[in-house]
Image (cartoon, coloured by chain):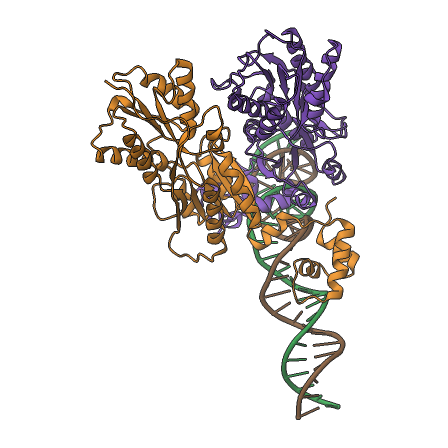
Chain colours: A purple, B orange, C green, D brown
Amino acid sequence: MGITSHDVARLAGVSQPTVSRALRGDTRVSAATRAKVREAATALNYVPSEAGRSLSTRSTRRIGVLVTDLTNPFYPHLIAPLHDELERLDNRMMLFTERTEAAVAADRLLDRSIDGVVLATVTLDSTLPAELRRRDLPFVFLNREGGSPTSDAAVVDNRLGGEIAARELVRLGHRHIAGIFGPENTSTGRDRELGFRLALADAEIALRQTHTRHGPFEFETGAKALADLLETTPAPTAVFCGNDVIALGALDTAKRAGVAVPDELTVIGFDDIPMASWAAFELTTVHHDMHEMARAAARLLVDRISGSADSAEPRRVVLEPELVRRGTHAEVTSHR
Amino acid sequence: MGITSHDVARLAGVSQPTVSRALRGDTRVSAATRAKVREAATALNYVPSEAGRSLSTRSTRRIGVLVTDLTNPFYPHLIAPLHDELERLDNRMMLFTERTEAAVAADRLLDRSIDGVVLATVTLDSTLPAELRRRDLPFVFLNREGGSPTSDAAVVDNRLGGEIAARELVRLGHRHIAGIFGPENTSTGRDRELGFRLALADAEIALRQTHTRHGPFEFETGAKALADLLETTPAPTAVFCGNDVIALGALDTAKRAGVAVPDELTVIGFDDIPMASWAAFELTTVHHDMHEMARAAARLLVDRISGSADSAEPRRVVLEPELVRRGTHAEVTSHR
DNA sequence: ACCTCCTGTGTATACGTATGCACATTATTC
DNA sequence: GAATAATGTGCATACGTATACACAGGAGGT
């Protein structure tokens, strides 16, 4: 059935350990033997068994990636570069898309089939980070952070991003401002809202309770929330959305309701996913380098696993956001 | 470090094999012993080693999924239900997003770390299916098929889908018709084009060479191709796109070029991804049940692996497409 | 009381690779 | 030319789990 190193050894006329050494580039093996072994291995189409190797080396070169919802257009743009960087570092990616993140999932992570975990959609109240730490399974936060600050993480300066959005709205003369924020139990949701509120407060602009909504970072959140907000008086002239996907939902509702963007309503998003620049949207948004963030997370984790980040203090990579002005923002023309 | 079944055995005062039997629900183990073992396992937070189990059982309950590009909005909607169905069948998903699909990738698949493969972006000329068959690694085609017809597959009736699109354009009175098709070396690209051409021919409408483009199933393909097509004379009054993502690219160009859809140009897509129904697009498209297709692929593969599809002939699940009329189609009003 | 059968558990071993250690062979040194 | 060092390879074993098989002990039958 499966070709093993013993088969290769027999054909090459050497012992099994010599096969292992020859193929792994052990310098103590002679050139002649190495050639013989390589030849035999090729002839038999030998591929080393991953399970055997893992059992022996106690390392799998496999990384678990936890995401709640793949169909959210945001995550693929995080996962793709993450995958590529992990491959570059000679690790394979194992994707877990769990709605639950419960104890059930934990066993999947703790069966020693992965060397570490990338947490991309953790909530602030999740017990998973603590559990992983307790079991000595290395992990890194990507995009979102957990409650405990003593972990490796690759994130954006979300608070600054919120401030940037707020300052732009102020600059454009908006006074009736609304916010459709992400979940309060995520670091991204919380920090973007915090920065936004602080900068508005600095400009002495109130963010009314009635102009505030929260929800998951999904299209439907923006769609429903804006429908609500359009009913309020005074109607907001601008709305800041917790991320681009929410903003796209808001734009959808605006279009259906016949509200002109940006003439009657300014919309600002967060993330600058590729769709934001499509002609159908031309979304003004807070940009950051998602690819670099994902790659940084991969590097942090692999460093941690290899121990070159030797039980050192946690390392954080924080990216700078910046505003990208496109077509969904405008100065206030008339407001009563 | 890691807790093993030996540790559990010692604590429970039994032998290691008894631990294995007790935890796996072997009926020959007494209730009392089972309880003791369970208790010890819980106390120690024991999680069985995946590598040890795989080595012993020669099965990993892990499925490889091959996709070229995750950031293409189409694939997440295939991968999400695939993941869920695999989990439901007690298998884990291992994602491989390879630009290459070369021999490099093959070793990843052949190291016995997966029990089977879902091929979601195979080309007709790929040698991978033959290689997998040669190594006795079960696989299933999802969405696209390879050249060899003797494999399990879950696909759409793409030819019928192409015919449906063509008939609709004919019905609407279009005579100057264009096509932006997918790659000719994919079954989806080829069959949709074939069906489209056949149905047009039935209506005695010519599809001019100058009104035909091919390219990867990407946004840019549609965007660039439509820019080209708008330069031709007579300009097409309708364009059929190989899939929705291409169609969205075409809509993007139409919008930028000031071409009114559907008044001046009818656009029809394929797949009916969720974005197609967004207000920004309202894309008329050929719908099929992507979720069911993905789930079917998962079931076919798992059946094949478990051997209940005992070396039987290949099984194909073919889904029926149907037209969904939204806002990007219209009758021809004036044409010279 | 003997034999048989069944139930439950332990013993031995397989799965495939990697590595510490011993050892044989050859090269090096004085 | 003998002692020593360097080089290359094999032997034994570990990694953690699952399973074929042996076997002890008790139940049931006559």
Residue A134: x and y, percent?
Answer: 76, 39
Q: Nearer the viewer, residue A134 or B253?
A: B253
Q: Compared with residue D15, is residue B266 higher up or lower down, i.e. above or below?
A: above
Q: Compared with residue B40, is residue A204 higher up or lower down, i.e. above or below?
A: above
Is B57 situated left or right of B262 in this image? right
Q: Nearer the viewer, residue C28 or B183?
A: B183
- Asked which quadrant contains residue A80, the reply is top right
Q: Nearer the viewer, residue A300 or A132?
A: A132
Image quarter in which the C terminus of chain A is found: top right
Can residue A22 be seen in the rendering of this structure?
yes
Q: Nearer the viewer, residue A252 or B145?
A: A252
Count the labels in the image.
0
Residue A307: x and y, percent?
Answer: 70, 31
Residue B152: x and y, percent?
Answer: 41, 48
- The residue shown at (43%, 25%) is B248
Can residue B124 be seen in the rendering of this structure?
no
- Asked which quadrant contains residue B285, the reply is top left
Residue B60: x and y, percent?
Answer: 56, 49
Residue projecting furthest to the left = B204
- The residue shown at (31%, 19%) is B229
